Image: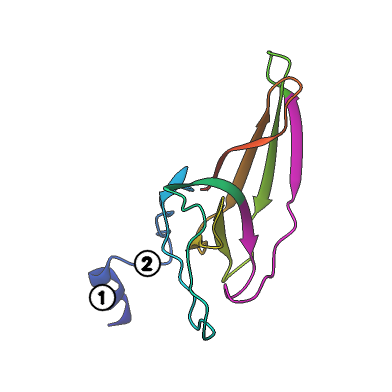
Amino acid sequence: MGGAVLAALGLSAGVAMAAPEPFSCPAQIAGTAQTAQDVPAGWQSVVDQPVAVHVLQGFRINLGPLDTADGDVPDDTVEKGDGKGGKRETTTWKLAGKRGAYAVCQYAATKLVLARPLDGYTQCTLVNHRRREGVYRLESAGCQ
């Protein structure tokens, strides 16, 4: 009977679950609303220089609940020339055995992050690019 139930559900010991779809952090998010929760008497809360778009600025792997900063150390970082005098730096995290981890996409001019659970994913990659005589800028971040 147990085998019939498994067969009816489309499950068996020899069938692997499909891997989740690869994803990338969105390159930007629309402006965020920020307000003070409690303004002292005599003061007013005003957003100084509102930002219309927040650009992807950082990426990390969090090993536990999002309310704790428990960042994972990357497994590998490789820097290669881009053929134009710049450099491309690729950082990789291997996710085997890291249940309950999250990908965290961080954006400029806000503390708001986008987070996604990583169960079922095998690897995440962060790519930074530096043009000749420039600073590194985040090019892409995602997991597969």
Q: Which residues are magenta?
A: 59-80
Q: Amino acid at mark 2?
A: Ser
Horizontally, is 123 left or right of 71 in the view? left
Task: Residue 112 in the image: state x and y as whole percent.
Answer: 51, 62
Count of numbered labels shown in the rendering: 2
User: Image point 46% across, 53% down: which residue?
Assistant: 50
Q: Considering only vertical position in the picture, is 141 above or below 63?
A: above
What secondary structure is found at the residue carrying circle 1? helix
Disc 1 target residue: 4
Task: Residue 78 in the image: state x and y as whole percent.
Answer: 75, 35
Q: Residue furthest top?
A: 84
Horizontally, is 80 left or right of 58 in the view? right
Whichever of labels 1 and 2 marks the residue nearer the N terminus, that label is 1
Task: Residue 43 in the image: state x and y as whole percent.
Answer: 52, 77
Q: Nearer the viewer, residue 121 or 49?
A: 49
Tell me if residue 5 can be seen: yes
Disc 2 target residue: 12
User: Image point 68% across, 19% down: which residue?
Assistant: 82
